[in-house]
Amino acid sequence: MPHDPTAADTTTAGSTTAGTTAEEPPTLPTDRHTGCPFDPPAELTALSDQPLRRLRYADGHIGRLATGHAAARAVLADPRFSSRYELLHMPVPVPGMPPELPSAPVGDITGLDAPEHTRYRRLLTGRFTVRRMRQLTERVEQFTTECLDAMEQAGPTADLVEAFAQPVPALMICELLGVPYADRERFQSQVAVIFDQAADAEARGGAYAALLQYLNELVLAKRAEPTDDLLSDLTTSDLTDEELAGIGGLLLAAGLDTTANMLALGTFALLSNPDQLDALRADPGLAGQTVEELLRYLSVADPILRTALEDVEVEGRIVKAGETVTVSVQAANRDPHRFPDPDRLDIHRKATGHLSFGHGAHQCLGQQLARVEMAVAFPALFARFPTLRLAVPPQEVPLRERSNIYGVISLPVTWDEE
């Protein structure tokens, strides 16, 4: 059960008593207005010297906040911390979300623990190998070229989100799931509404319901006539139709929105750091390294929540059974103990070990596909448009701040026509 909110934050393994008083636990810092749209809230990174401290949650729960890289990694790797939604407390209020979270819908493996999670994970892991994802590189290159062709023809200005950042991963999800070409426009239009920050909840909910219905129809089609794609592969398993449709929805949500925002925000970051962009242009072989550094630097998917199933020692602190830990990926990826000079974008940095894909049993299944997409897309974009630049002042780029996937709502860009 949650520990006494007045307990001192100096509780350590083996302690039988704690301090008699402590300052009021803070709420999660969310204000990013630091002058740089790529930096985490200043109050958050200031807590790096307290890598696992107490935190007050939206419902009054007193849990923990992990900001240090080692603490975050330890929590994510430990099976004594649960991912089950119904055990989690939200660090900040979420409009429309009930006080107590429901359990994960069918097929959503991110909200499950072993052994249920293990069953799904084993079925999916073989379909997301590095080798298989690299085999998709040719398709990524094709879709990237098609989007750049359309962007060039419609130019010399564009919203990079609409013209490039969303279509590339959307087309790859279609490829992965085996969505027929005749259905891809319908698929993409529903996806656009789901991730449209300006759309109201009713419209987004309706689009998601329509998409799930389509995925149910697609599963039945794959069972009748399998093709060379992920859903067809999975029809040979013991997964039910409902489970297959749910997994399709999960892959869409997890694989499209994150990559789309990385492509758009990553372009914004490179345009804002011309020395780094020049280095990438001079040596496209740095693409893979650039992707890893952008993943670390931007940390678009944040935070990750876990709840302790029993008392667990982490970095000398005891996390009590029932306490939710908010793992701040953006703070962990800016931990100076792990990444020297962490607030600087440096594409020559060896950024391996970042936590942008999570860590442990729930580490992102589609991470290799995301890497392939970005490693192809960034160099191709800047090679096609060597004079690419923002079409508005940087401070006028609308940021996607009310979402657990950070990014830009739109990215107006322009270039010189030859």
Image (cartoon, rainbow, N blue to C red):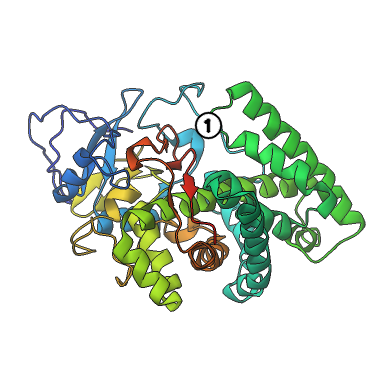
Which residue shows up at 16% across the image and 28% down it?
6
Instruction: Give the answer, above or below, for where 381 lies relative to 40.
Output: below
- State whether residue 98 is above or below residue 74: above
Name the residue tied to disc 1. 197
Task: From the top left corner, tell me how far across and down residue 85 is, in percent.
Answer: 50, 37
Q: How many marks?
A: 1
Q: Residue sitting at 12 percent across and 36 percent down?
A: 8
Q: Horizontal placement of 188 versus 264: left or right?
A: right
Q: Is residue 303 left or right of residue 24?
A: right
Q: Nearer the viewer, residue 282 or 208?
A: 282
Where residue 274 sits, quadrant-wise, is bottom left
Identify the amino acid type marked 1: Gln
User: Who is closer to the viewer here, 398 or 406?
Assistant: 398
Crowding near pointer 1: few (<14 within 10 Å), some, many (20+)?
some
The one of 407 and 207 positioned closer to us in this rendering: 407
Residue 259: image location, x then y, percent: 52, 53
Residue at 23% x, 41% y is 44
Quarter of the picture containing the N terminus is top left
The residue depicted at 74 percent of the width and 46 percent of the height is 245
* Residue 410, image x, y percentages: 49, 40
Going by the picture, which residue comes out furthest to the right?
224
Q: What is the quadrant of the C terminus in the image?
A: bottom right
Q: Quadrant of residue 28?
A: top left
Q: Position of residue 169 (x, y in %)?
A: 61, 55
Q: Is residue 247 visible to the viewer in this orientation of the structure? A: yes
Image height check: is 143 above or below 112? below
Question: Tag 1's secondary structure?
Answer: loop
Q: Point out the residue furthest to the front here.
A: 418
